[in-house]
Image (cartoon, rainbow, N blue to C red):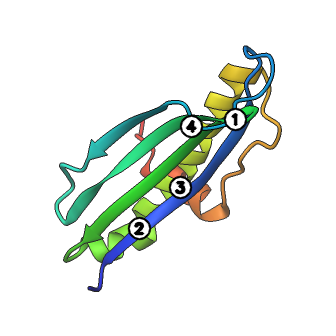
Amino acid sequence: MPGEFGHRHAGRRVRDRQREGGVEQVVDVIAGRFTFTGPRGFDGFHEYAVSAEHDHTMLGHALAMSTHGPARLTWLLTFRPLHDALIEDSFDRAEHTVTGIVARPARWSATVRRLRLRLAPRT
């Protein structure tokens, strides 16, 4: 169906400094799912999941959504680039919180920088 898609960020592997040795299998997965309540035309959810895998911890993000009406265009032109930048920024913050550094910080695209300038509150 047009307008339906899934979107998955690969996630970040963060070495688990609090464990000695490795984890041989996924022991626990902690997830948070957020259902869209607006704007109109966005139906679905996105979620974060944290899991322990071998010698690292994996933080991932998934998006499952369908768009309807004007949201099909606003998603592509506005919300998707801003959403992706926000998720990458959240991965950077999580990595910094766990390790104290960010190995490869995300960079905003020219499109994201323009959108943020245009949509920033006027003071």
Q: Quadrant of residue 104?
A: top right
In the rendered image, the quadrant that contains the C terminus is top left
Q: What is the spatial separation of the Cα atoms under label 4 and label 1, in whole angstroms?
A: 27 Å
State the CA–CA distance, disc 4 to disc 3. 10 Å
Closer to viewer: mark 1 or mark 3: 1
Frontmost residue, 105 versus 97? 97
Q: Position of residue 119 (x, y in %)?
A: 43, 51
Sooner in the amino-acid sequence: mark 4 or mark 2: 2
Does 47 sit left or right of 116 as displayed? left
- Between discs 3 and 2, the one toward the N terminus: 2
Q: Secondary structure at mark 4?
A: helix
Q: Indicate the amino acid at tag 4.
A: Ser
Which label sits in the foreground, 3 or 2?
A: 2
Of callouts 1 and 3, the N-terminal one: 1
> Of callouts 1 and 2, which one flags the residue occurring earlier in the amino acid sequence?
2
Tell me the element at label 3.
Answer: helix
- In front of the other: 7 or 87: 7
**Mark 3 and mark 4 in contact (Cβ < 8 Å)?**
no
For label 2, the SS is: strand
In three-dimensional space, the C-alpha distance between marks 1 and 3, rounded to whole angstroms, equals 31 Å
Residue at image mark 2:
6
Tell me which amino acid carries mark 1. Answer: Glu
Mark 3, residue position: 84
For marks 4 and 3 on the same chain, the one whose residue lies earlier in the sequence: 3
The residues tagged by marks 1 and 2 sit, at their Cα atoms, a distance apart of 29 Å
Q: Which residue is mark 1?
A: 24
Which residue is rendered at x = 21% and y = 55% of the image?
39
Between marks 1 and 2 in the image, the one whose residue lies nearer the viewer: 1
